[in-house]
Image (cartoon, rainbow, N blue to C red):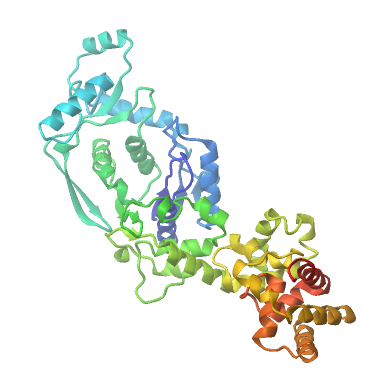
Amino acid sequence: MERVRFAPSPTGYLHIGGARTALFNFLYARQKQGTFILRIEDTDLQRSSKESEEVIIRDLQWLSIEWDEGVGKGGDYGPYRSTERLHIYKEYVEKLLEEGKAYYCYCTPEELEQQRKQLLEKGEMPRYTGKCREMTRKEREALEARGLKPVIRFKVPQNQTISVNDLIRGKVEFDSSGIGDFVIVKSNGIPVYNFAVVIDDHLMKITNVIRGEEHLSNTPRQILIYKALGFELPKFAHVPLILGKDRTKMSKRHGSTWVEHYRDQGYLPDAIVNFLALLGWSPEGEQEFFTIEELVEQFSFDRVAKNPAIFDIDKLNWMNSHYIKKSPLDKITRLCVPYLIDAGFIQEDEVEAKFEWLKQVVETVRESLTVLSEIPAKTEIFFKDKISLEEENVHILKREHVKELINAFLKLLDETDRHIDDNLAKQIFKKVQKTTGVKGKNLYMPMRIMLTGKTHGPELFKVCSIMGKERLIKRLEYVKQNMIQ
């Protein structure tokens, strides 16, 4: 059975690239009817936090990228946090030391910096030169007596070609002579990522390591550890980097790099998943919108590109707008409610009683929404008694016939005891036209500005229906008293 994993470091929010990696692992596992594992790589003790782990888990769940085994779910190959597996790593470290495949290194940071400078002056790639490789036990004891705490380095065999048959990039080769003996255990006794990940992947029976291209440079070191311990190699697949539209490393100027930002801004998880799937992978046809089931069915490494994927925020916005329009109205309204509460437009304990009315409000504006966080600005006309005018529209309300329009409209509203729906609103406008003789743009433009403060927006009869008689009267009375000479 195929077994894959997503193994983030809990040192911050879930990066958009990490979410894409998790998604590709999830799609592959589902397609192969395999197992998707979530493991937490928390060996960076200074930067790792429980809070970051919780954020990562929450964001994955929000995206519906569900794992079968691992943190929060358990399984037969736990524990699933690196810091809970230190006793396991120790066994394999000792094995490498006993077999002469690893050694203690006492070089100080100053000595290492001097080695680096000397190699650069020679035009060589900086690497550890092996100063402590053949140190005797007596020499080690003398250094430890001075209080020096060693790291443990892996003894890299020289003049070997390390080959990776990558499922995306094909055959990639590295020269072991350019690597240098690398650290596998820090001076505090904590294994580094490149060592721990090999032990974990082997013991958890990971068959396919699917991760970002930035990890390709780690792969030769990991392969050396696999071979030194006699482990079978998994298959590797390194998915392309994600760049901004200017083809530079993705940063805030291209759009936020954190999944949490997109959730908070009101992007729908289905839109994010659809967008992420197309970052580096392309379907066979022209289809652009996919359900998760369709992605599972069609996903393959054959159609994952080697070249970097371009993060296009405009395309994401377009996709999100599509999902907002196509999602059930009840669902979108529920998702809009927190933004309306935060804006002070409605109280939490009012939501259920007013839900049907809120649905009408959302339905009226959702065609114009890019993200759900825009909902307060788009709907404030339905919640406030006062309006603020766009500067260029002030002169329209100063026309001679406007006061006559308001008076006619207020009179008709006062006379009706019916609920104002679209049809009644239409009838009222017809009566105003008949009473005043004002029609067309001269009627509808001032009325729209008085009711909404803008010259464009939702269909005017629908606006009247949603506002209702009481708010319409308040709005027009306010305009009459404050905005008309």
Closer to the camera in the image, 341 or 409: 409
Closer to the camera in the image, 348 or 279: 348
Task: State whether residue 428 appears in this view.
Answer: yes
* Residue positioned 31% across, 14% down in the render: 148
Quadrant location of residue 335?
Answer: bottom right
What x and y, as percent, mark residue 131?
Answer: 18, 22
Seen in the picture, residue 212 relative to 477 is either above or below; the reply is above
What x and y, as percent, mark residue 122?
Answer: 10, 31
Q: Is residue 253 left or right of residue 430?
A: left
What x and y, as percent, mark residue 437?
Answer: 75, 91
Task: State whether residue 105 appears in this view.
Answer: no
* Residue positioned 79% across, 56% down in the render: 349
Quadrant location of residue 155?
Answer: top left
Q: Quadrant of the C terminus?
A: bottom right
* Residue positioned 25% across, 13% down in the render: 140
Closer to the camera in the image, 260 or 100: 260
Closer to the camera in the image, 388 or 256: 388
